[in-house]
Image: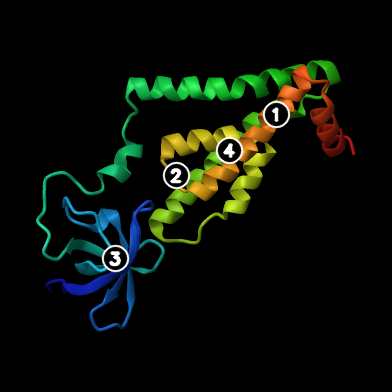
Amino acid sequence: MKPVLHKGKLTTWKDDKGFGFIRSSDGSQDVFLHITALEETNHRPQVGDVICYQLTVGKDGRIHACNAFIEGVVSKPMPIASSFAIEKETFQPKAKYSLMFEVLLLSLLPGLGAMHFALTTFNPIPLILYPVMSFVTFALYADDKSRAKQGRWRVSEKRLHLCEFMGGWLGGFIAQRRLRHKNRKVSYQVVFWVIVAIHLIFWLDWLFFGKRLVGLFFSSVFRG
């Protein structure tokens, strides 16, 4: 039996996340559309585009559009999903070295501060907390990215920011660069960099300005 070709209008499109919803021509349902379901084209999807598509059931049990194309748009060899598939490609050497340099630069002050804190107070918790929370935060970013692609319930921004504040901001930074996730949303970036600044100021105070802020923070959190 030949698959049925449906038609509808794109009513929602999140270009930074690569998905949206099609309202079927009869108005009976909204169908999830991911960027990878579109045929090769040089036209970015926009709200109001007429989409021709077939239906399939995704891994999450929901109805998804597949084998879709934008009506009236000519296909081209370059895949439209290429900008979203870039995270799967191997980083070029320059990009790798650039990221390594940025990570080293950002982690230098907290790393020295945490080591000095451990040596002077015999409390290694900050030294352990940074790598552990960075790993947890990176994993949450990756999970949220996967959920966004599948149209599933997302990891809350509050949860991500809390993990960043608890020491995982470096893992968040690496995830933003490697996964291309949460790196375009201005409001998110403002909160993220405020968290980074708080950590840097704390360790700057600990190493050079009398240790007032950091000593007060870690004493209150880890000693009672």
The residue carrying pointer 1 sits among few (fewer than 14), some (14 to 19) or many (20 or more) residues within 10 Å by Cα, namely some
> Earlier along the polypeptide chain: callout 3 or callout 2?
3
Would residue 110 appear left or right of 183 to someone viewing this image?
Answer: right
Residue 85 seen in the figure:
yes
Q: Name the residue under label 1.
A: 201
Q: Mark 2 points at which residue?
A: 181
Quadrant in which the C terminus appears: top right
> Earlier along the polypeptide chain: callout 3 or callout 1?
3
Residue 98 in the image: above or below residue 41: above
- Residue 190 vs residue 78, the one in the foreground: 190
Expressed as whole percent of the image width and height from the top left, the position of residue 2 reads 12, 72
Residue 188 in the image: above or below residue 195: below
> What's the residue at 25%, 72% (across, down)?
9
Name the amino acid type tagged 3: Val
> Earlier along the polypeptide chain: callout 1 or callout 4?
4
Which numbered disc covers residue 47? 3
Name the amino acid type tagged 1: Ile
Which numbered disc covers residue 193? 4
Q: How far apart are marks 1 and 2 (CA)?
A: 26 Å
Residue 133 seen in the figure:
no
Where on the picture, by quarter, is residue 64? bottom left
Quadrant in which the N terminus appears: bottom left
- Residue 166 vs residue 150, the one in the foreground: 166
**Which type of secondary structure does the marked residue at label 4 adopt?**
helix
Name the amino acid type tagged 4: Trp
Expressed as whole percent of the image width and height from the top left, the position of residue 101 reads 48, 19
The residue carrying pointer 4 sits among few (fewer than 14), some (14 to 19) or many (20 or more) residues within 10 Å by Cα, namely few
The residue carrying pointer 2 sits among few (fewer than 14), some (14 to 19) or many (20 or more) residues within 10 Å by Cα, namely many
Name the amino acid type tagged 2: His
Q: How far apart are marks 1 and 4 (CA)?
A: 12 Å
